[in-house]
Amino acid sequence: MSSFLEVAHIQKSYFLNGKRIDVLRDVNVKIAQGELVSLVGASGSGKSTFLHVVGTLDMPAAGTMHFKGKSVFEMNDAEVAEFRNRTIGFVFQSHFLLPEFTAEENVAMPALILREDRKKSFKRARELLERVGLAQRAEHKPGELSGGESQRVALARALMLKPDLLLADEPTGNLDPATGEGIHALLREMNKDLGITAVVVTHNEALAQSLPRRLRLKDGQVVDA
Ligand SMILES: Nc1ncnc2c1ncn2[C@@H]1O[C@H](COP(=O)(O)OP(=O)(O)O)[C@@H](O)[C@H]1O
Ligand SMILES: [Mg+2]
């Protein structure tokens, strides 16, 4: 049986001013459907690089990735774009909400861009906002939301197209610890209730400990933490 996500022998280096930095040296990870995984590691250890590779935002120099048995790095551009749109949901440290649009419009945006049915999209956006506890903020624009609320909207938006895999890169990095714990509690709840599979990069060891499985990026490799 093929696993949900399997990355093998991933290598990625950066070249800057003639100097090579080997960030990912040999990354091997298997993640099962429904797993909620934290990824910790020192600043600069390659956590974001790893998430970008898994999310197909960046290509590795070597290695393979299989998603439900399909070899992702062998897909053509259109297939990769479809994979990224339909399979992956991203949450970043900054929420990247569009300032001109309301919370509800921001959540619905991924579906609107794909020209999905407007009415259905807004209905789902409302449901997701309710899910993250922000139904009463649907008409607020990002400038009228707190940091924690903005991040919850970003999480709702990441779930708009029902991704199979949620990738979160320090989603609580800009939040105070209590607000950050709220986001992690929400991730645990969504994992439990909706069966969402997620990899969450975090600096906060206590938050990492609160997730069922822990990975660490160290010396260019991913190891159990
Ligand atoms: N575009 C780039 N060009 C050159 N070096 C980079 C680039 N992106 C990241 N790096 C370097 O790669 C290393 C890993 O970066 P990153 O994956 O962002 O680490 P982390 O997310 O764990 O803090 C760092 O040393 C960083 O300086
Ligand atoms: Mg990073």
Image: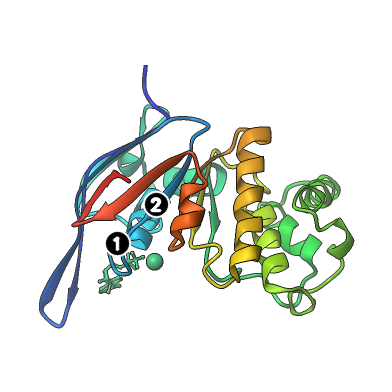
Q: Amino acid at mark 2?
A: Leu
Spot occupied by residue 108 in the image (x, y as percentages of width and height): 74, 56
Q: Amino acid at mark 1?
A: Gly
Question: Within 10 angstroms of label 2, few (less than 14), some, or many (20 or more) residues?
Answer: many
Q: Nearer the viewer, residue 167 or 41?
A: 41
Where ligand 1 lies, by quadrant?
bottom left
Quarter of the figure with residue 201:
bottom left
Residue named by callout 1: 46
Which is closer to the viewer, label 1 or label 2? 2
Quarter of the figure with residue 43:
bottom left
Q: Is mark 1 within 8 Å of ligand 1?
A: yes
**Element type at mark 1:** loop
Q: Is residue 162 visible?
A: no
Work out whether mark 1 precedes mark 2 in sequence or the reverse, and give the earlier one: 2
Spot occupied by residue 154 in the image (x, y as percentages of width and height): 65, 61
216 lies left or right of 99: left
